[in-house]
Image (cartoon, helix red, strand yellow):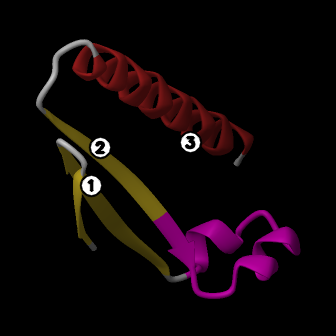
Amino acid sequence: MLEEKDAFIKQQQEDLFRLKQERLSCSQSPGVTAIITKKYRNQYPILGLLSDDYKITSPVNKSQTVVIERTGEIWKHD
């Protein structure tokens, strides 16, 4: 169980590092910037504090938000 949590945290850190690098490389060139973020929602997140196995048995919904910025205009897609 602890190894799964460590792997999950490491994956999130790698995603954050990759997104920061993409943002830095895109900010140097003018034009279109695309930011993609992932959101994970538990139906009852407070129950995750009660036991370690809740993450495995809980219904987890995954959604993705894409934000495209272009010269001041912002389009959002959920």
Pick whichever of labels 1 and 2 is earlier in the sequence: 2
Label 1 sits on a secondary structure element that is strand
> In the image, is 45 to the left or to the right of 11?
right
Q: Is residue 49 above or below residue 1?
A: below
Within 10 Å of the Cα at label 2, are there few (<14), some (14-19), or many (20+) other Cα atoms?
some
Task: Report the amino acid beneath label 1.
Answer: Val
Instruction: State if disc 3 and disc 1 touch (CB < 8 Å).
Output: no
Mark 3 element type: helix
Q: Is residue 52 left or right of residue 3?
A: right
Q: Nearer the viewer, residue 38 or 23?
A: 23
Q: In x, y percent, where is residue 8?
A: 56, 42
Between marks 2 and 3, how big is the CA–CA gap? 21 Å
Kindly report the distance in space between the C-alpha atoms of the residues bearing marks 1 and 3: 25 Å
Check disc 3 and report the residue beneath it. Answer: 8
In the visual, does 9 lie left or right of 17? right
Position of residue 72 measured from the top left corner of the image (x, y, whole percent)? 24, 48
Residue 77, which numbered label? none
Q: Is residue 46 magenta?
A: yes
Q: CA distance from mark 1 to mark 2?
A: 5 Å
Q: Magenta stretch?
A: 40-58
Mark 1 burial class by Cα count in 10 Å: few <14, some 14-19, many 20+: some
Q: Going by the picture, which residue comes out furthest to the bottom? A: 43
**As drawn, 68 above or below 41:** above
User: Of marks 2 and 3, which one's residue comes earlier in the chain?
Assistant: 3
Give the residue furthest to the left.
Answer: 31
The reply to whether callout 1 and callout 2 are in contact (CB within 8 Å) is: yes
Residue 35's disc is 2
**Which residue is at a point 80% across and 79% down the rendered structure image?**
46
Q: Circle 1 sits on which residue?
A: 67
